[in-house]
Protein backbone atom coordinates (compact mmCIF):
# COMPACT_ATOMS: atom_id res chain seq x y z
CA UNK A 1 0.00 0.00 0.00
CA UNK A 2 1.46 3.40 -0.96
CA UNK A 3 1.51 5.72 2.07
CA UNK A 4 1.37 9.52 2.18
CA UNK A 5 4.64 11.45 2.38
CA UNK A 6 6.14 11.70 5.90
CA UNK A 7 5.04 14.90 7.63
CA UNK A 8 1.84 15.29 5.59
CA UNK A 9 -1.67 14.54 6.81
CA UNK A 10 -5.04 13.83 5.24
CA UNK A 11 -7.81 15.96 6.67
CA UNK A 12 -10.67 13.49 6.99
CA UNK A 13 -14.41 14.23 6.81
CA UNK A 14 -14.63 13.80 10.56
CA UNK A 15 -12.21 16.69 11.12
CA UNK A 16 -13.12 18.96 8.23
CA UNK A 17 -15.78 20.70 10.33
CA UNK A 18 -13.06 22.05 12.59
CA UNK A 19 -11.19 23.38 9.55
CA UNK A 20 -14.30 24.92 8.01
CA UNK A 21 -15.06 26.57 11.32
CA UNK A 22 -11.62 28.22 11.72
CA UNK A 23 -11.58 29.21 8.04
CA UNK A 24 -14.95 30.92 8.61
CA UNK A 25 -13.50 32.84 11.56
CA UNK A 26 -10.46 33.91 9.46
CA UNK A 27 -12.75 35.33 6.78
CA UNK A 28 -15.17 37.02 9.14
CA UNK A 29 -12.65 38.70 11.44
CA UNK A 30 -10.26 39.72 8.61
CA UNK A 31 -13.13 41.32 6.79
CA UNK A 32 -14.31 43.13 9.92
CA UNK A 33 -10.83 44.73 10.12
CA UNK A 34 -11.00 45.70 6.41
CA UNK A 35 -8.50 43.07 5.22
CA UNK A 36 -8.86 41.54 1.72
CA UNK A 37 -7.70 38.09 0.71
CA UNK A 38 -4.75 37.64 -1.65
CA UNK A 39 -3.79 34.22 -3.02
CA UNK A 40 -0.32 33.55 -4.38
CA UNK A 41 0.89 30.37 -6.13
CA UNK A 42 2.21 27.61 -3.87
CA UNK A 43 5.58 27.71 -5.61
CA UNK A 44 7.87 30.61 -6.42
CA UNK A 45 11.32 31.18 -7.82
CA UNK A 46 13.72 30.09 -5.06
CA UNK A 47 15.31 33.56 -4.86
CA UNK A 48 11.99 34.99 -3.53
CA UNK A 49 12.69 33.17 -0.26
CA UNK A 50 16.49 33.11 -0.10
CA UNK A 51 16.84 36.88 -0.25
CA UNK A 52 13.99 37.76 2.05
CA UNK A 53 14.02 35.11 4.78
CA UNK A 54 17.84 35.22 4.92
CA UNK A 55 20.49 32.78 3.72
CA UNK A 56 21.58 31.86 7.23
CA UNK A 57 18.16 30.98 8.61
CA UNK A 58 17.03 27.39 9.33
CA UNK A 59 14.25 27.72 6.77
CA UNK A 60 16.56 28.59 3.87
CA UNK A 61 19.45 26.45 5.04
CA UNK A 62 17.75 23.17 5.62
CA UNK A 63 13.99 23.27 5.35
CA UNK A 64 13.06 24.37 1.85
CA UNK A 65 11.56 22.06 -0.74
CA UNK A 66 13.55 23.30 -3.72
CA UNK A 67 13.94 21.61 -7.07
CA UNK A 68 14.97 22.33 -10.62
CA UNK A 69 12.01 22.27 -12.98
CA UNK A 70 12.23 20.95 -16.52
CA UNK A 71 13.72 24.19 -17.80
CA UNK A 72 16.35 24.12 -15.06
CA UNK A 73 14.83 26.93 -13.06
CA UNK A 74 15.14 26.63 -9.28
CA UNK A 75 11.65 26.52 -7.79
CA UNK A 76 10.65 26.33 -4.12
CA UNK A 77 7.40 25.24 -2.48
CA UNK A 78 6.55 28.24 -0.32
CA UNK A 79 7.78 27.83 3.27
CA UNK A 80 5.98 31.02 4.35
CA UNK A 81 3.63 33.64 2.99
CA UNK A 82 5.11 37.08 3.55
CA UNK A 83 7.78 37.03 0.83
CA UNK A 84 5.39 35.77 -1.90
CA UNK A 85 2.80 38.34 -0.86
CA UNK A 86 5.34 41.17 -1.07
CA UNK A 87 6.43 39.84 -4.48
CA UNK A 88 2.79 39.86 -5.62
CA UNK A 89 2.12 43.35 -4.25
CA UNK A 90 5.13 44.75 -6.14
CA UNK A 91 4.52 42.81 -9.35
CA UNK A 92 0.86 43.84 -9.52
CA UNK A 93 1.57 47.46 -8.51
CA UNK A 94 -0.93 47.21 -5.68
CA UNK A 95 0.85 49.68 -3.49
CA UNK A 96 0.67 52.43 -6.12
CA UNK A 97 -3.11 52.04 -6.25
CA UNK A 98 -3.54 52.55 -2.55
CA UNK A 99 -1.04 53.81 -0.03
CA UNK A 100 -2.25 51.38 2.60
CA UNK A 101 -2.92 47.71 1.95
CA UNK A 102 -4.60 45.36 4.37
CA UNK A 103 -4.21 41.77 3.12
CA UNK A 104 -4.67 38.22 4.40
CA UNK A 105 -3.87 34.79 3.06
CA UNK A 106 -4.51 31.17 3.91
CA UNK A 107 -3.27 27.89 2.52
CA UNK A 108 -0.66 25.13 2.59
CA UNK A 109 3.03 25.77 3.26
CA UNK A 110 6.02 23.45 3.16
CA UNK A 111 9.04 23.00 5.40
CA UNK A 112 11.31 19.97 5.60
CA UNK A 113 11.28 19.71 9.39
CA UNK A 114 11.32 16.75 11.75
CA UNK A 115 7.62 15.92 12.08
CA UNK A 116 6.05 15.83 15.53
CA UNK A 117 2.77 16.92 17.12
CA UNK A 118 1.96 20.34 15.66
CA UNK A 119 4.89 20.23 13.26
CA UNK A 120 4.44 18.93 9.74
CA UNK A 121 6.15 19.15 6.38
CA UNK A 122 2.99 20.35 4.73
CA UNK A 123 1.13 22.61 7.14
CA UNK A 124 -1.31 25.50 6.86
CA UNK A 125 -0.98 29.13 7.75
CA UNK A 126 -3.40 32.00 8.01
CA UNK A 127 -1.54 35.30 7.81
CA UNK A 128 -2.30 39.00 7.61
CA UNK A 129 -0.08 41.85 6.44
CA UNK A 130 -0.61 45.59 6.87
CA UNK A 131 1.48 47.37 4.26
CA UNK A 132 2.22 51.08 3.97
CA UNK A 133 2.22 52.41 7.53
CA UNK A 134 5.32 52.97 9.62
CA UNK A 135 3.32 53.93 12.69
CA UNK A 136 2.83 51.87 15.87
CA UNK A 137 -0.94 51.84 15.38
CA UNK A 138 -0.47 49.41 12.49
CA UNK A 139 1.59 47.02 14.67
CA UNK A 140 -1.16 47.25 17.28
CA UNK A 141 -3.88 46.66 14.68
CA UNK A 142 -2.16 43.48 13.47
CA UNK A 143 -1.72 42.15 17.02
CA UNK A 144 -5.32 43.04 17.85
CA UNK A 145 -6.55 41.26 14.70
CA UNK A 146 -4.63 38.15 15.71
CA UNK A 147 -6.06 38.22 19.25
CA UNK A 148 -9.60 38.66 17.94
CA UNK A 149 -9.18 35.67 15.65
CA UNK A 150 -8.03 33.54 18.57
CA UNK A 151 -10.99 34.72 20.61
CA UNK A 152 -13.35 34.16 17.64
CA UNK A 153 -12.19 30.54 17.57
CA UNK A 154 -12.80 30.32 21.30
CA UNK A 155 -9.15 30.23 22.40
CA UNK A 156 -8.84 32.35 25.51
CA UNK A 157 -5.79 30.87 27.10
CA UNK A 158 -2.90 32.32 25.12
CA UNK A 159 0.12 34.51 25.79
CA UNK A 160 1.25 37.45 23.68
CA UNK A 161 5.02 37.95 23.83
CA UNK A 162 6.47 41.08 22.30
CA UNK A 163 9.92 42.51 21.78
CA UNK A 164 11.66 45.13 19.69
CA UNK A 165 14.68 44.48 17.50
CA UNK A 166 14.88 48.22 16.87
CA UNK A 167 15.94 49.79 13.60
CA UNK A 168 18.99 48.57 11.69
CA UNK A 169 21.40 50.77 13.64
CA UNK A 170 20.16 49.53 17.01
CA UNK A 171 20.17 45.94 15.87
CA UNK A 172 23.73 46.17 14.48
CA UNK A 173 25.01 47.70 17.70
CA UNK A 174 23.33 45.00 19.74
CA UNK A 175 24.66 42.28 17.49
CA UNK A 176 28.24 43.38 18.14
CA UNK A 177 27.63 43.45 21.86
CA UNK A 178 26.00 40.03 21.83
CA UNK A 179 28.88 38.54 19.82
CA UNK A 180 31.32 39.92 22.38
CA UNK A 181 29.33 38.37 25.22
CA UNK A 182 28.81 35.00 23.56
CA UNK A 183 32.49 34.71 22.52
CA UNK A 184 33.32 34.35 26.20
CA UNK A 185 30.97 31.39 26.52
CA UNK A 186 31.50 29.67 23.19
CA UNK A 187 32.80 26.39 24.59
CA UNK A 188 29.76 26.06 26.87
CA UNK A 189 27.19 26.58 24.09
CA UNK A 190 25.43 23.69 22.35
CA UNK A 191 26.72 22.66 18.95
CA UNK A 192 23.64 24.16 17.31
CA UNK A 193 24.18 27.49 19.01
CA UNK A 194 27.88 27.53 18.13
CA UNK A 195 26.88 27.15 14.50
CA UNK A 196 24.28 29.88 14.86
CA UNK A 197 26.82 32.09 16.56
CA UNK A 198 28.95 32.01 13.41
CA UNK A 199 26.14 32.72 11.00
CA UNK A 200 23.29 34.43 12.81
CA UNK A 201 24.20 35.22 16.44
CA UNK A 202 20.81 36.67 17.42
CA UNK A 203 19.30 33.24 16.86
CA UNK A 204 21.33 31.85 19.79
CA UNK A 205 18.79 33.68 21.99
CA UNK A 206 16.13 31.36 20.56
CA UNK A 207 17.83 28.12 21.65
CA UNK A 208 15.76 25.60 23.61
CA UNK A 209 18.90 23.99 25.12
CA UNK A 210 18.95 24.40 28.91
CA UNK A 211 22.59 25.45 29.20
CA UNK A 212 22.19 27.89 26.29
CA UNK A 213 19.18 29.41 28.02
CA UNK A 214 21.19 29.84 31.22
CA UNK A 215 23.96 31.61 29.31
CA UNK A 216 21.69 33.87 27.26
CA UNK A 217 19.69 34.81 30.38
CA UNK A 218 22.69 36.87 31.43
CA UNK A 219 23.39 38.22 27.92
CA UNK A 220 22.93 41.93 27.24
CA UNK A 221 19.30 42.81 26.44
CA UNK A 222 18.43 44.21 23.04
CA UNK A 223 16.07 46.65 24.74
CA UNK A 224 19.10 48.46 26.21
CA UNK A 225 20.39 49.17 22.71
CA UNK A 226 17.33 50.76 21.15
CA UNK A 227 17.85 54.31 19.92
CA UNK A 228 15.32 57.11 20.40
CA UNK A 229 13.32 56.32 17.26
CA UNK A 230 13.14 52.63 18.12
CA UNK A 231 12.11 53.30 21.72
CA UNK A 232 9.37 55.69 20.59
CA UNK A 233 7.97 53.14 18.19
CA UNK A 234 7.98 50.34 20.76
CA UNK A 235 6.44 52.57 23.45
CA UNK A 236 3.71 53.56 20.96
CA UNK A 237 2.84 49.92 20.29
CA UNK A 238 2.74 49.04 23.99
CA UNK A 239 0.57 52.05 24.80
CA UNK A 240 -2.10 51.16 22.24
CA UNK A 241 -2.07 47.46 23.19
CA UNK A 242 -2.63 48.43 26.81
CA UNK A 243 -5.56 50.65 25.83
CA UNK A 244 -6.98 47.78 23.80
CA UNK A 245 -6.81 45.59 26.93
CA UNK A 246 -4.42 43.20 25.25
CA UNK A 247 -2.34 41.44 27.87
CA UNK A 248 1.25 41.18 26.67
CA UNK A 249 4.58 40.16 28.12
CA UNK A 250 7.83 41.76 27.06
CA UNK A 251 10.30 39.07 26.13
CA UNK A 252 13.71 40.60 25.31
CA UNK A 253 15.05 37.31 23.97
CA UNK A 254 12.36 36.96 21.32
CA UNK A 255 14.12 37.29 17.95
CA UNK A 256 12.14 34.97 15.59
CA UNK A 257 13.56 32.78 12.88
CA UNK A 258 13.34 34.98 9.81
CA UNK A 259 15.80 37.74 8.97
CA UNK A 260 13.42 40.32 7.59
CA UNK A 261 12.19 41.74 10.90
CA UNK A 262 12.99 45.04 12.55
CA UNK A 263 11.29 46.98 15.34
CA UNK A 264 8.35 45.02 16.78
CA UNK A 265 8.38 41.22 16.85
CA UNK A 266 5.77 39.14 18.63
CA UNK A 267 4.61 35.61 19.20
CA UNK A 268 1.41 33.94 20.41
CA UNK A 269 1.90 30.95 22.65
CA UNK A 270 -0.39 28.37 24.17
CA UNK A 271 0.40 25.95 26.97
CA UNK A 272 -2.06 23.48 25.38
CA UNK A 273 0.51 22.65 22.70
CA UNK A 274 3.48 21.12 24.51
CA UNK A 275 6.87 21.51 22.85
CA UNK A 276 5.58 23.33 19.78
CA UNK A 277 3.94 26.06 21.82
CA UNK A 278 3.98 28.82 19.25
CA UNK A 279 0.54 29.27 17.68
CA UNK A 280 1.84 32.07 15.52
CA UNK A 281 4.03 35.07 15.29
CA UNK A 282 5.12 38.00 13.23
CA UNK A 283 6.60 41.44 13.25
CA UNK A 284 7.51 44.54 11.34
CA UNK A 285 9.58 44.31 8.16
CA UNK A 286 10.35 47.79 6.84
CA UNK A 287 13.26 46.70 4.61
CA UNK A 288 11.72 43.72 2.81
CA UNK A 289 10.37 45.69 -0.16
CA UNK A 290 13.84 47.04 -0.91
CA UNK A 291 15.20 43.46 -0.95
CA UNK A 292 12.92 42.97 -3.95
CA UNK A 293 14.23 46.14 -5.60
CA UNK A 294 11.10 48.16 -4.83
CA UNK A 295 10.86 51.45 -2.99
CA UNK A 296 11.08 51.24 0.78
CA UNK A 297 7.64 50.43 2.16
CA UNK A 298 6.94 49.90 5.86
CA UNK A 299 4.90 46.82 6.75
CA UNK A 300 3.92 44.56 9.61
CA UNK A 301 2.21 41.18 9.72
CA UNK A 302 1.85 37.77 11.36
CA UNK A 303 0.87 34.19 10.64
CA UNK A 304 -0.83 31.44 12.62
CA UNK A 305 -0.07 27.74 12.23
CA UNK A 306 -3.53 26.36 11.57
CA UNK A 307 -2.76 22.75 12.63
CA UNK A 308 -1.85 24.16 16.04
CA UNK A 309 -5.10 26.13 16.25
CA UNK A 310 -6.97 22.92 15.40
CA UNK A 311 -5.15 20.96 18.15
CA UNK A 312 -6.35 23.55 20.69
CA UNK A 313 -9.85 23.79 19.20
CA UNK A 314 -10.29 20.01 19.51
CA UNK A 315 -9.73 20.36 23.24
CA UNK A 316 -12.21 23.17 23.79
CA UNK A 317 -15.10 22.33 21.49
CA UNK A 318 -17.44 19.40 21.07
CA UNK A 319 -16.76 18.42 17.47
CA UNK A 320 -20.35 17.28 17.04
CA UNK A 321 -21.62 20.83 17.55
CA UNK A 322 -19.93 21.89 14.31
CA UNK A 323 -21.41 19.12 12.19
CA UNK A 324 -24.37 20.07 10.10
CA UNK A 325 -26.61 17.00 10.36
CA UNK A 326 -28.90 16.03 7.46
CA UNK A 327 -32.38 17.54 7.50
CA UNK A 328 -33.98 14.56 5.84
CA UNK A 329 -33.14 10.93 5.23
CA UNK A 330 -35.45 9.43 2.62
CA UNK A 331 -36.60 5.98 3.61
CA UNK A 332 -38.12 4.71 0.40
CA UNK A 333 -39.79 1.54 -0.75
CA UNK A 334 -40.13 2.88 -4.30
CA UNK A 335 -37.80 2.07 -7.15
CA UNK A 336 -34.71 4.31 -7.33
CA UNK A 337 -35.78 5.51 -10.80
CA UNK A 338 -39.39 6.11 -9.82
CA UNK A 339 -40.68 9.50 -11.10
CA UNK A 340 -42.43 10.39 -7.84
CA UNK A 341 -39.32 9.59 -5.79
CA UNK A 342 -36.96 11.49 -8.11
CA UNK A 343 -39.13 14.60 -8.36
CA UNK A 344 -39.51 14.65 -4.57
CA UNK A 345 -35.73 14.52 -3.94
CA UNK A 346 -35.21 17.24 -6.54
CA UNK A 347 -37.85 19.45 -4.97
CA UNK A 348 -36.39 19.08 -1.46
CA UNK A 349 -32.83 19.81 -2.63
CA UNK A 350 -34.08 22.92 -4.44
CA UNK A 351 -35.34 24.08 -1.05
CA UNK A 352 -31.68 24.02 0.13
CA UNK A 353 -32.33 21.18 2.55
CA UNK A 354 -29.64 18.63 3.31
CA UNK A 355 -31.19 15.48 1.89
CA UNK A 356 -29.72 11.96 1.97
CA UNK A 357 -30.99 8.96 0.07
CA UNK A 358 -30.10 5.29 0.18
CA UNK A 359 -27.95 4.15 -2.75
CA UNK A 360 -27.63 0.51 -1.79
CA UNK A 361 -31.26 -0.55 -2.30
CA UNK A 362 -31.48 -1.56 1.34
CA UNK A 363 -34.63 -2.74 3.08
CA UNK A 364 -37.06 -0.23 4.58
CA UNK A 365 -35.90 -1.30 8.04
CA UNK A 366 -32.21 -0.89 7.22
CA UNK A 367 -32.86 2.56 5.76
CA UNK A 368 -34.74 3.54 8.90
CA UNK A 369 -31.77 2.45 10.99
CA UNK A 370 -29.42 4.44 8.76
CA UNK A 371 -31.55 7.60 9.14
CA UNK A 372 -30.93 7.38 12.90
CA UNK A 373 -27.24 6.60 12.48
CA UNK A 374 -26.57 9.70 10.36
CA UNK A 375 -28.48 11.85 12.87
CA UNK A 376 -31.10 13.15 10.42
CA UNK A 377 -33.77 15.43 11.80
CA UNK A 378 -36.53 13.72 9.80
CA UNK A 379 -37.02 10.37 8.14
CA UNK A 380 -39.21 10.87 5.09
CA UNK A 381 -41.19 7.67 4.59
CA UNK A 382 -42.15 6.90 1.04
CA UNK A 383 -44.06 3.90 -0.28
CA UNK A 384 -46.84 3.03 -2.70
CA UNK A 385 -49.48 4.49 -0.34
CA UNK A 386 -47.80 7.92 -0.32
CA UNK A 387 -47.22 7.83 -4.07
CA UNK A 388 -50.83 6.93 -4.84
CA UNK A 389 -52.24 9.65 -2.60
CA UNK A 390 -49.64 12.29 -3.59
CA UNK A 391 -48.39 12.60 -0.04
CA UNK A 392 -45.29 12.16 1.98
CA UNK A 393 -44.96 10.95 5.58
CA UNK A 394 -42.52 12.84 7.73
CA UNK A 395 -41.23 11.31 10.94
CA UNK A 396 -39.41 13.50 13.45
CA UNK A 397 -36.66 11.22 14.69
CA UNK A 398 -36.16 12.93 18.01
CA UNK A 399 -39.56 11.80 19.33
CA UNK A 400 -41.15 9.74 16.56
CA UNK A 401 -43.89 12.33 15.85
CA UNK A 402 -45.32 11.61 12.41
CA UNK A 403 -47.29 13.81 10.02
CA UNK A 404 -48.56 13.57 6.45
CA UNK A 405 -47.96 16.41 4.00
CA UNK A 406 -49.34 16.86 0.50
CA UNK A 407 -46.62 16.74 -2.19
CA UNK A 408 -47.80 20.10 -3.59
CA UNK A 409 -47.52 21.91 -0.26
CA UNK A 410 -44.00 20.74 0.64
CA UNK A 411 -42.55 24.10 -0.44
CA UNK A 412 -44.62 25.83 2.23
CA UNK A 413 -43.57 23.47 4.96
CA UNK A 414 -41.01 24.93 7.35
CA UNK A 415 -38.55 22.13 8.07
CA UNK A 416 -36.47 24.31 10.39
CA UNK A 417 -39.29 25.11 12.75
CA UNK A 418 -40.49 21.63 13.49
P1 LIG B 1 6.81 31.61 11.38
O1 LIG B 1 7.00 31.88 12.83
O2 LIG B 1 7.90 30.95 10.65
O3 LIG B 1 6.45 33.00 10.71
O4 LIG B 1 5.49 30.75 11.20
C1 LIG B 1 4.28 31.16 11.78
C2 LIG B 1 3.58 29.99 12.44
O5 LIG B 1 3.41 28.92 11.51
C3 LIG B 1 4.36 29.35 13.58
O6 LIG B 1 4.19 30.06 14.78
C4 LIG B 1 3.71 27.99 13.67
O7 LIG B 1 2.50 28.06 14.40
C5 LIG B 1 3.38 27.70 12.21
N1 LIG B 1 4.37 26.76 11.65
C6 LIG B 1 5.61 27.03 11.19
N2 LIG B 1 6.22 25.91 10.76
C7 LIG B 1 5.34 24.90 10.95
C8 LIG B 1 5.36 23.49 10.71
N3 LIG B 1 6.41 22.88 10.16
N4 LIG B 1 4.27 22.76 11.06
C9 LIG B 1 3.18 23.35 11.60
N5 LIG B 1 3.10 24.68 11.84
C10 LIG B 1 4.16 25.43 11.53
C11 LIG B 1 6.18 33.17 9.38
O8 LIG B 1 6.00 32.26 8.61
C12 LIG B 1 6.07 34.62 8.99
N6 LIG B 1 5.80 34.67 7.53
C13 LIG B 1 4.98 35.32 9.77
C14 LIG B 1 4.82 36.75 9.36
C15 LIG B 1 3.85 37.27 8.60
N7 LIG B 1 5.65 37.73 9.66
C16 LIG B 1 5.22 38.86 9.09
N8 LIG B 1 4.14 38.58 8.43
Image (cartoon, rainbow, N blue to C red):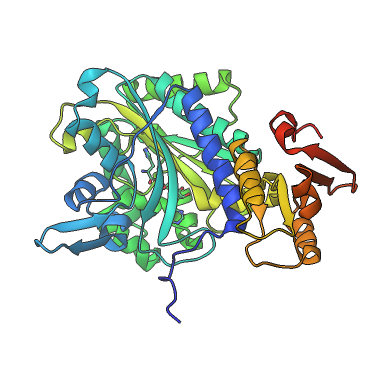
Left-right relation of 204 to 50: right
User: Which residue is located at x 27 percent, y 17 percent?
Assistant: 99
Q: Position of residue 403 (x, y in %)?
A: 86, 41
Task: Tell me if residue 165 comes above or below residue 245 in the rendering.
Answer: below
Q: Can you name the residue that lies furthest to the front here? A: 388
Q: Position of residue 177 (x, y in %)?
A: 30, 43
Quarter location, residue 284: top left
In this view, the residue in front, 356 or 4, is 356
- The image position of residue 33, as x and y in percent, is 48, 23
Query: For this rendering, which residue is in front, 74 or 268?
Result: 74
Compared across the picture, whether 295 is left or right of 372 comes to left
Asked where in the image residue 235 lies, by quadrant, the reply is top left
Q: Along the line of sight, which residue is nearer the eye, 193 or 31? A: 31
Q: Is residue 414 above or below residue 325?
A: above
Rendered residue at 55%/48% (across/down): 19
Q: Does residue 345 appear left or right of residue 399 in this picture? A: left
Is 169 placed above or below 319 here?
Answer: above
On the question of residue 271 being in view, the answer is no
Quarter placement of the N terminus: bottom left
Residue 104 lies, in percent from the top left, at 40, 34
As drawn, is 382 to the left or to the right of 273?
Answer: right
Can residue 232 be seen from the camera position used here? yes
**Residue 262, quarter of picture:** top left
Q: Residue furthest left?
A: 71
Q: Nearer the viewer, residue 174 or 403?
A: 403
Q: Residue at x 49, y 33 (%)?
A: 27
Q: Residue at x 86, y 47 (%)?
A: 398
Q: Quadrant of the C terminus?
A: top right
Amino acid sequence: MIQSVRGTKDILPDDIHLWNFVEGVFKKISSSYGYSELRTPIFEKTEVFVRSIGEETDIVNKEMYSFLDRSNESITLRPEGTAPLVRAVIQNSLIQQSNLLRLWYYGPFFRYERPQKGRQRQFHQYGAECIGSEFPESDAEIISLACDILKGIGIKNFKVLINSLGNNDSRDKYREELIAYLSNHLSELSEDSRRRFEKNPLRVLDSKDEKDIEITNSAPSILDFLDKESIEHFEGVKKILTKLDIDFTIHPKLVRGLDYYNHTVFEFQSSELGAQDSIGGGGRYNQLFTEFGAKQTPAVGFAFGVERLIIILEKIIEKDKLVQKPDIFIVSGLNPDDDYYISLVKKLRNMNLKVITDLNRRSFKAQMKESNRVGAKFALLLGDDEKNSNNITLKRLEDGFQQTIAFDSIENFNFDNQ
